[in-house]
């Protein structure tokens, strides 16, 4: 566990030394979201209808924006070799890095989204639902994005390629995340519909957690050759 | 003398082209193997193959009589790595870099060993500086200090004297001699002569 904790602490400390990197991602999330009411117009019922989808999409883009440096920085300065050479499983190292990424992007996005939801005229239950779905769904984004980041390591235009790879894989999470909030907003099915969607969202996160670290580690070994 | 490391028939391919083929050598306690050869002759690839970073196409690598594939983690724990990249984080201080590197090797860092390694390469005054503010030579010294602090038994060194000034080269030689005298092993790819008595040489051809 020494290595796992040390790697997570290192990545968090690196973010702490350069807070602008995270600030840019969160600022992008806010700006991208706020553009929708400006573009669509002030009809309250329209905005409330699209709020969940817009916020989820913007969170997805923001998460992807921050992912292209996840392994690239380590690849460039040679610390990735040290991780590959560490006498403990690379899968755990991958998990530590994705966990640190989630703490500095997924978590703040989940906190920020309900605040922005107010601007869309969402009611309190929907705001809470939005925060909860993002909390459960963003770990999947960190892991899926981590796989895309590992696969595109060293490629030219890796940022665009990363988005192209990761976005389709994030579609299930997006659908269930946004529609879970929708069930609350519609008031149909009540808590039961929400619980079902949330359970599927959690299942997606758990499946990603159980499989993707191995895939990411394999991709990193390839990149190390 | 018993051979600790035995490499037999090692072959490697990169991008479909063979880099080296049927390479065999062995190393005993306290021995240094210097890899020479022109650019592109596969010195770095050989080091990466030994570290299992690049898969070997054929051949066996044995460490203490056992195939290294059998227990990769024990093999990695025995390795000290100095690659062509320094493996330092620019936004961390020099000391933090060494502490993190030790923990990433899975062991709680011993402050005394890190201080000694920093002192060897005259890095103590720089220990609290962010690595991105250091010069290339200072960063190389920091990478060497990390290698020394790790206390591994087999060192794999890629151009260890790169970017070092004269006094640091002397320090590096001293460190390498002490490592060998203590029964350590080392394989170094280098263009500049290391100036270590009794070193064996393996010349690679492109």
Image (tube, rainbow, N blue to C red):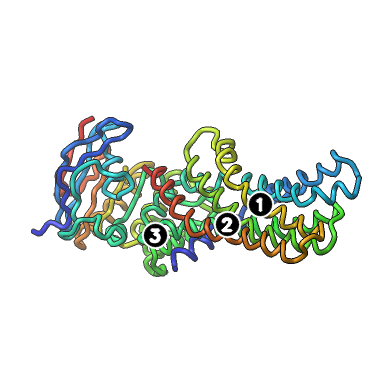
Say yes or no: labels 3 and 2 on the same chain: yes
Left or right, B124 with reference to B56? right
Tell me where residue B122 appears, x and y as whole percent: 40, 56
Which residue shows up at 23% across the image and 52% down it? B186
Please tell me the numbered disc located at residue B190.
none
Q: In the orientation shown, which residue stands out farthest toward the front?
A: A189
Residue A197 visible (yes or no): yes
Kindly identify which residue carries mark 1: A22
Task: Chain letter for mark 1, please.
Answer: A
Image position, residue A73 (x, y; %): 51, 46
Q: Separation of disc 1 and disc 2 at Cα?
A: 25 Å
Q: Earlier in the sequence, mark 3 or mark 1?
A: 1
Query: Residue A126: horizontal and vertical position, in percent?
Result: 79, 60
Foreground of the two, B9 or B167: B9
Image check: A89 left or right of B154? Answer: right
**Mark in the foreground, 1 or 2:** 2
Report the quarter where the N terminus of chain B lies: bottom left
Quarter location, residue B64? bottom left
Judged by depth in the image, the label closer to the viewer, 3 or 2, is: 2
Q: Which residue is mark 2?
A: A204
Identity of the residue drawn at 21% across and 44% down: B34
| Front one among A28 and A36 | A36
Crowding near the residue tagged with mark 3, few <14, some 14–19, many ≥20 C-alpha atoms within 10 Å: some
């Amino acid at each position: 566990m020494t290595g796992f904790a040390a790697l997570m602490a290192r990545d968090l400390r690196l973010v702490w030394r350069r807070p602008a990197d995270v600030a840019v991602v969160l600022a992008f999330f806010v700006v991208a979201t706020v553009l929708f009411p400006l573009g669509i117009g002030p009809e309250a019922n329209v905005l409330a209808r699209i709020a969940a989808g817009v916020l989820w999409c913007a969170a997805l883009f923001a998460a992807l924006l921050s992912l292209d440096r996840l392994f690239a920085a380590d690849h460039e300065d040679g610390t990735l070799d040290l991780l590959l050479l560490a006498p403990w499983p690379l899968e755990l190292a991958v998990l530590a890095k994705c966990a640190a990424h989630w703490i500095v992007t997924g978590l703040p996005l989940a906190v920020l989204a309900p605040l922005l939801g107010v601007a869309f005229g969402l009611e309190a239950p929907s705001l809470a639902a939005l925060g909860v779905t993002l909390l459960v769904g963003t770990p999947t984004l960190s892991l899926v994005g981590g796989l895309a980041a590992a696969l595109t390591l060293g490629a030219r235009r890796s940022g665009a390629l990363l988005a192209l790879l990761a976005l389709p894989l994030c579609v299930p999470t997006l659908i269930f995340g946004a529609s879970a909030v929708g069930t609350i907003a519609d008031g149909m099915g009540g808590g039961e519909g929400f619980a079902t969607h949330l359970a599927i969202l959690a299942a997606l996160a758990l499946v990603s957690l159980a499989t993707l670290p191995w895939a990411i580690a394999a991709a990193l070994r390839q990149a190390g050759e | 003398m018993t051979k600790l490391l035995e490499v037999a028939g090692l072959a490697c391919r990169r991008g479909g082209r063979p880099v080296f083929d049927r390479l065999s050598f062995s190393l005993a306690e306290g021995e240094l193997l210097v890899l020479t050869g022109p650019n592109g002759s596969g010195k770095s690839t050989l080091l990466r193959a030994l570290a299992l970073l690049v898969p070997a196409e054929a051949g066996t690598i044995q460490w203490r009589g056992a195939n290294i594939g059998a227990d990769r983690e024990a093999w990695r724990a025995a390795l000290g790595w100095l690659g062509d990249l320094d493996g330092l984080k620019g936004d961390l201080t020099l000391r933090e870099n060494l502490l993190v590197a030790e923990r990433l090797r899975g062991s709680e860092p011993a402050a005394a060993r890190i201080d000694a390694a920093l002192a060897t390469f005259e890095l103590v005054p720089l220990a609290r500086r962010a690595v991105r503010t250091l010069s290339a030579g200072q960063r190389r010294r920091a990478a060497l200090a990390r290698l020394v602090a790790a206390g591994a038994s087999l060192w794999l060194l890629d151009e260890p004297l790169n970017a070092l000034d004269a006094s640091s080269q002397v320090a590096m030689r001293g460190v390498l001699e002490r490592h060998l005298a203590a029964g350590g092993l080392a394989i170094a790819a280098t263009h500049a002569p290391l100036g270590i008595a009794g070193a064996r040489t393996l010349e690679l051809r492109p």
